[in-house]
Amino acid sequence: MRDDTVARARRRYGGLIDPTLTTYDASLDLAADDRAEDVAERLAEHFRRHPRERVVLRLDGADVGISDAARLRRAQGVAGGADADVGAADRAGLLGRSTRFRAVGFVCGGCGRTAVLSYYDDRFLPTCADTADCPGPMELVR
């Protein structure tokens, strides 16, 4: 496996990895397209059965890093902050944070400039800054 593939995986799953851990009890094999949220769910299932174990994440036989239950809890966090009382209106202490957001990319058909938004509305598509050469709205990248 190439070093850059392992480095990319470490960036993708970095919140789940504790760099101070050096030993492990079990392994979890990853696919190249596994999302961090899905890996976190698989780790949570493992830690429900084996709460004291440490798990090495492996991608194509290469060790990416080691996780434990404490690291997973820190990575998942607590919505509203840890000091919030459960049911305290907008500071409700729901477990975890939403991880289902994705960046939405747009490209200009004229000059190739790109824009990234957190959401979009078909009625208000972004337009290119160079309006002289690029008339009309930018195109959604799928």
Image: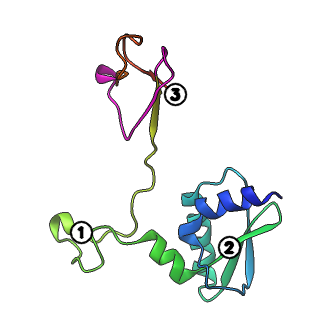
Identify which amino acid the numbered label 3 is placed on.
Val
- Position of the N terminus, as image quadrant, is bottom right
Give the extent of the magenta segment. Answer: 108-125
The residue carrying pointer 3 sits among few (fewer than 14), some (14 to 19) or many (20 or more) residues within 10 Å by Cα, namely few
The residue carrying pointer 2 sits among few (fewer than 14), some (14 to 19) or many (20 or more) residues within 10 Å by Cα, namely many
Residue 92: which numbered mark, if any? 1
**Residue at the image point whose x is 57% and y is 79% from the top:** 48
Q: Is residue 111 left or right of residue 96?
A: right
Q: Position of residue 4 (x, y in %)?
A: 73, 56
The correct choice, above or below, for 20 with respect to 16 in the image is below
Q: Position of residue 134 (x, y in %)?
A: 41, 13
* Cα–Cα span, label 1 and label 2: 33 Å
Residue 65: which numbered mark, if any? 2
Q: Is residue 127 left or right of residue 86?
A: right
Q: Say which label, 1 or 2, has the lower sequence index.
A: 2
Q: Which residue is mark 3?
A: 141
**Residue at the image point whose x is 63% and y is 75% from the top:** 46
Q: Element at badge 3? A: loop
Identify which amino acid the numbered label 2 is placed on.
Gly
